[in-house]
Amino acid sequence: MSKNIEAKDLNIYYGSFRAVEGVNMSIKKKTVTALIGPSGCGKSTFLRSINRMHEVIAGAHVEGRLELDGQDLYGPGMDPVIVRRQIGMVFQRPNPFPTMSIYDNVIAGMRLNNKKAKKAEFDDTVERSLRGANLWNEVKDRLDKPGSGLSGGQQQRLCIARAIAVQPDVLLMDEPCSALDPISTLAIEDLINELKNEYTIVIVTHNMQQAARVSDFTGFFNIEGTGKPGKLVEMDETKTIFSQPKQKATEDYVSGRFG
Amino acid sequence: MSTGTERNDLETQGPELDIPATPELLPKVQGSLPKGTAWGILAASAVVVGGILAATGFSIGLWVFLTVVLFAVATYVISRVVEGPRKATDRLVTVVVGSAFAIAMIPLVSVIWTVISNGVARFDAAFFTNSMRGVVGEGGGAYHAILGTLIITALAALMSIPIGMLTAVYLVEYGKGRLARAITFFVDVMTGIPSIVAGLFAYALFALIVGPGVRMGFAGAVALTVLMIPIVVRSTEEMLKIVPNELREASYALGVPKWKTILKIVIPTTAGGIATGITLAIARVIGETAPLLIAVGITTGVNLNPFDDRMATLPVFAYYSYVAPGIPREPFLDRAWTAALVLMVIVMLLNIIARIISRAFAPKTR
């Protein structure tokens, strides 16, 4: 399962402060879309608004439309909890649940959402998700050990396994490799390439090589100055953005000239 | 390279270094006192002060005090001469910190020693199996008081733990704005309520409901609840606050509702800390005397019904044995000390249980 996302004139606020202004963006299903831009330009904020995690912060809200296959996620009667079940998220820092074993971490989403299932079904989910996250061979002999005993890269892949165990339509990744070494990063990038066969993936990254390596489309966010809202400057196929972008700002940023 | 090459000839990686012929060297330490010097100075100070005091009239308190003062001064001076000012300051502060610790330990050790040495005489089977019904002299025990204390404290815990924990959850997870601030303020105020006021409150409350002159275990439990709630709220609140927000977000991102995130992720993550806080809160109120004196009173026989009439409790039992002993006095005083000892043992057991619980619940990494 996989769905398209479309943002229509999306404005994102923290209290009365407008952090992101007028985003119009379409994200195609079964592709990887990278969001790049300088710190504070609102790309993470935009990402968090896709699965309504943005509004967890007090005072944060959104105006405009954000559609998942045509359905407005911010429309009346939409439950953020239901939205989040369809749109999974992987965070910057690996955050496995410290009280749970590796096994329990993977099925945490199912278990906490009251899904009744037989032991065999849970076992299947754990194996499928861990294989999907390229972690199965490393942990299959110690599934009952705590997840926090794994290395940083393994923990991050465990978090990915946990996110895909609930079989979402979309997977959001907020700088998933920024706390990892290059080998773990490569493992995650390989994984992203495999995952896009099944999921729509949106990834925020500060690493432009990574954006060039893993993504099909790239969106460039920028900010004019502190206190000003961030904007989507340009979005196109990744190779276009990195070779012949239409905007000067994009070209400066991807070639390392800014300011 | 073959073995036998000089260390200097070892091939090192990196650029060639350009070390000046007369490099600017870092200053070295001037010298250092040999290990154990501190103990030597301490012993010498003790002897010197002892000698002076022997001439003028000896007193142990003055001897210890002057020894420490002389020790601090001597250490500082000697170290300053030999090792320089920074080390000397370090040693001086070490002596001050160590002395402060020793001073803090004096009352603790003294209390434990006094209670054990006086209480051990009646720390026997009879004390745990007999009540005071019909006992006028020797013998008798605090069976009724031990059970009374356990029942009343358990009732207080039963009432204050849910209220306290839920309040803390509200303050940390839901509360914002004026209401949360007001609750925090009143919890702070409650922390400062003198225990006798809590006792009077419970007595007055039950006097209104049941009638004047009422004495019952439950009233005592209510008084203890008033004292216990703020402690439970505070400790639980602190524990919930240290749960990283990332865990909550990880749970929300899986589509888990907020209440379930709190119940299944936040509280289990910090269950050990919460359990420790609650146990310490129980330990704190189990020795309360004043509110129980007012609201529960004392009796000589076993009364296990907290809703009917007076009950005995250990602190009040100890208090009455001391202020209103019979004749001869000694058996009553002995029982008072043993009651204090039993209370101390119960508190100690609670602390040990708290440690076991917190270890059992602590998130593991292996």
Image (cartoon, coloured by chain):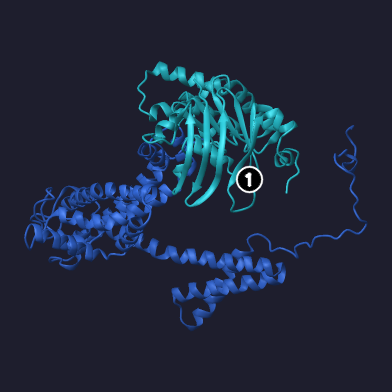
Chain colours: A cyan, B blue
* As drawn, B126 above or below A195: below
- A112 or A80, which is in the foreground? A80
> Farthest bottom residue?
B56
Callout count: 1
Q: Is residue B140 visible?
A: no
For the N terminus of chain B, the image quarter is top right
Whether residue B347 is visible to the viewer of this picture, yes or no, is yes
Q: Position of residue A207 (x, y in %)?
A: 68, 36
Which residue sits at x=25%, y=63%? B195
Is A140 placed above or below B361 here?
Answer: above
Which residue is label 1 attached to? Answer: A39
For this rendering, which residue is in front, A245 or A194?
A: A245
- Identify the residue at horizontal 71%, vertical 72% (top origin): B81
Between B34 and B330, the one nearer to me in the picture: B34
Side of A174 relative to B141 (left or right):
right
Residue A162 at x, y = what percent?
Answer: 49, 28
Tell me where residue B186 sits by quadrant. Answer: bottom left
Q: Residues within 10 Å of mark 1 (few under 14, many from 20)?
A: few
Side (left or right) of A81 relative to A235: left
